[in-house]
Image (spheres, helix red, strand yellow):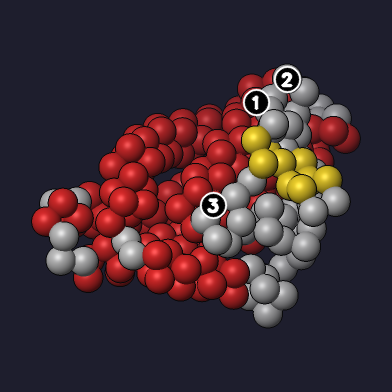
Amino acid sequence: MTVQLGAKPLADFSQPIEMMQDCHRRIEHFLGVLIKVTAQYGTRELTEEARQALAASLNYFANFAPRHTEDEEQSLFPRMRASQCAEVREVMAELDRLERDHRQGEVHHARVDQLVRQWLASGSIEARQREYLQQALDALASMYAAHIQQEEDHVFALASQQLAPGELRDMGEEMKRRRSPHGLRRGGVGEASDPLPIVARDKGGPPCQSSM
């Protein structure tokens, strides 16, 4: 089975760090969908395509993105904190900051989820609610931009160099278990390794698809 996000084949569980990077691309994509649909349809009636894009993005952040946070906080960060490597120990403060980002993001995502579900239910969004939604999306975009850059430029790069092959293999197995049928929360738009295809895309945005 070949699964792609855009034109680049997605990593599998034997490449846990690369798989986390692929998760970042999904986060960027689905957040971009929410921002784009809000900009295009915030003052007019939603089309069916726009409704599907909003629903798919909410589903991703509610049901699949949390596993990425678990991958980092339960599999990656503890191994880095246990490392005796001086270079790894220098990024300990960054790990604490990244975890605070996760908690902040959860608050913003809860607000976005509430507002967009109300929008989908009513078919329109009032000006004040639209303003609240835009503020939450702006906060997420700003947070993720810095957060992802910090992880990919520093934390992930160092982890790839310093963690032992056995540690990376164990991480991959833990990530696989989180994505097993028992570990899934609710059905919906999947990740590369999920049994469900990624189907959400918006016109002009990067393709996000799975071909089996």
The residue sitting at 74% across, 47% down in the picture is 3
Classify mark 1: helix, strand or loop.
Answer: helix
Q: Position of residue 2 (x, y in %)?
A: 76, 48
Q: Are marks 2 and 1 in contact (CB under 8 Å)?
A: yes
Q: Check disc 3 and report its element: helix, strand or loop.
A: helix
> Which numbered tag is attached to residue 36?
1
Is residue 12 placed above or below 28 in the rendered structure? below
> What residue is at 77 percent from the left and 23 percent from the top?
203
Give SS at disc 2: loop
Residue at image mark 3: 19
Image x and y of residue 7, in percent:
69, 31
The answer to whether residue 193 is left or right of residue 47 is left
Q: Amino acid at mark 2?
A: Gly
Q: Is residue 24 left or right of residue 188?
A: left
Q: CA distance from mark 1 to mark 3?
A: 26 Å
Number of other residues with Cα within 10 Å of mark 1, as a class: few under 14, some 14 to 19, many 20 or more: some
Regarding residue 61, the answer to whether it shows in the image is: no
Give the mark nearer the N terminus: 1 vs 3: 3
Going from N to C along the chain, the mark reached first, 2 or 1, is 1
Q: Is 151 situated above or below 162?
A: above
* Residue nearest the viewer, comparing 82 with 203: 82
Residue 52 spot, x, y in % from top left: 81, 41
Quick one: 158 or 26, which is closer to the camera? 158
Of callouts 3 and 2, the N-terminal one? 3
**Is 195 situated above or below 124?**
below
Q: Amino acid at mark 3?
A: Met
User: Crowdedness of circle 2 by 10 Å Cα count: few (<14), some, many (20+)?
Assistant: few
State yes or no: discs 3 and 2 in contact (Cβ < 8 Å). no
Q: Which residue is mark 2?
A: 204
Front disc: 2 or 1: 2
- Quadrant of res 196: bottom right
Using the numbered discs, state the Cα–Cα distance from disc 3 to disc 2 in whole angstroms.
25 Å
